Image (cartoon, rainbow, N blue to C red):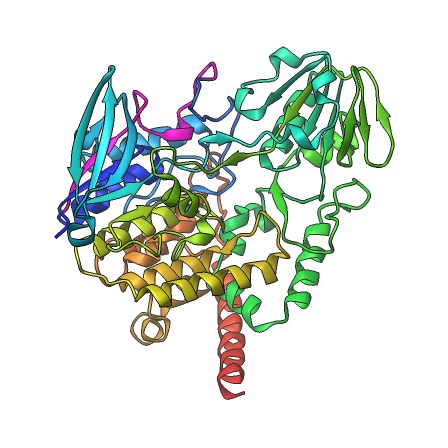
Amino acid sequence: MVRRVAIIGAGVSGLASIKCCLDEGLEPTCFEKNESIGGVWQFTETPEEGRATVYRSVISNTSKEMSCFSDFPFPADFPNYLRHSKLLDYLRMYAEKFHLLDYIRFKTTVCSVRKQPDFTATGQWLVVTETNGQRTSVAFDAIMVCSGHYAELNLPLDYFPGIENFQGRYLHTWEYRDPKPFEGGKVLVVGAGNSGGDIAVEIGRTGAQVFLSTRTGTWVLSRISDAGWPLDMIFTTRFSRFIERILPACFINRILAKKFRQWFNHENYGLIPVQSSWKPFIVNDELPSYILCGDVVVKPNVKAFTETSVIFEDETVEENVDVVIFATGYKTSFPFLDESLHSVCKSHMNLYKQVFPPHLEKPTLAIIGTIAIAGSTLPAVELQARWVTRVFNGSSKLPPVNKQISDIAKRKKDLLKHWGGSQIARTSFVSYMDEIAACIGVKPNIPLLFLSDTKLALEVVFGPCTSYQYRLNGPGKWKKARSAILTQWDRALKPLRTRVIDGSTKCTTASCLFKILALITFLGAASLVFRY
């Protein structure tokens, strides 16, 4: 029986895993190679080998209500989108509240994780760690790998002929901290993901000229949605997901593309995705303005470098480029695992429910947090940890290996169909959360909820799909979950209403009417689906 669990990493995933182990009666020991918690959210002034961290100006792309642990809301006065320092404060509060620091061994590196000789019978692992140059070997009943997917830089220099002759400086975003070293310079940012967009804008304020190279293009969304609400609180709902599932994908894509174009015409700005698809997108409130002002110029993919210039695929040339910043992301890597296991675990698409390697004789190793979903990862990794710890203690069971493999193959097929083979394929947030919740027994029962608590049911279906929904019933039920759901909009408003005008009220009538109409539509559509 599993009792002792080794947790590798004390970032978001590691902290959630420690708490879930304690909730399920397990004995966690967390190994963290750095001196503090927080993982990538722990900012450092200078890059440190083997340590990924955020740059100075990072602000979260998902709002606080969509990004909190399910039984620990953010303080109401915290801003809706958080600087890295605020998010780190929240993680520290979480660790203090649940006494998680007592189970962490800091400045301890995990060197290797290997099966014990009797693994087939016991499922145990031998974990070798190093602290202050001294190695220690300890046997554990189970392993939760929470080291994240920012371990290894993705720097594909082979795809850029001539880079070896380039006389300027080139670096990966891992080295970037702030725009000061690039003031007055001519800078090329390669890659239009979230980091690439942020850095292009930031350097654009003081640089002579910034070029943003994108291979596929991208939709650019603002954090601010209709009426000033956080974007993800408006769009990440069960009702929206239901509509996406019953309507043809091509129709949904056209609707979303039209919605995204309302802010600005992406084609005019050189950002329109190569394929007429809505799927690749970034969150950036300033990029369109900087393109409009000429501080950032969007370019196609790089064809080649010369000593001082850059040639693009449309044959245009930019001379006298001083610096190239590669915003090309990271690769998932678990160097402490043996090669056969590492080759499976380095891709979330090879794992059952993006968590369990399917071929192990005993399900005593889980990968937490390398998930790819269209939404906040924090509540998703917490739900993963809740499921995994229940599998470890025997409360939940995994299906036979052949069914796990079939599920993996189906997921791959669906993602390839939906995303066209893109490397940025992401699972729907609501669908994935419900999928894992069903494995635990905490997925909300919507019909029953409408019968027993209509007010709550309306908010669960038509409001944001926040993590509190997965504490309403079943294992780990939290008595304050209902209240947290019904007050989530109040917490979103709290940091905004710092100047309240006399007589100002919330427009609740219109909101209720919309939900009632939406409910009628929802029930009508559902009846048609079930009938035909």
Q: Position of residue 216 (x, y in %)?
A: 71, 44
Q: Is residue 484 above or below residue 151?
A: below
Work out which residue is located at the far bottom of the displayed protein and give it.
531
Residue at 75% across / 36% down in the picture?
A: 301
Q: How many marks?
A: 0
Is residue 360 within the magenta segment? no
The location of residue 365, given as percent across then percent down, is 28, 47
The majority secondary structure of the magenta stretch comes to loop
On the rendered image, what quadrant is the C terminus found in?
bottom right
Q: Is residue 27 magenta?
A: yes
For the magenta stretch, what is the residue range? Answer: 26-47
Q: Residue, x 25% and y 53% (percent of image)?
A: 480
Q: Residue at x 48, y 78 (%)?
A: 523
Closest to the observer, 384 or 404: 404
Whole-percent x, y for residue 43 in the image: 43, 22
Residue placed furthest toward the front: 117
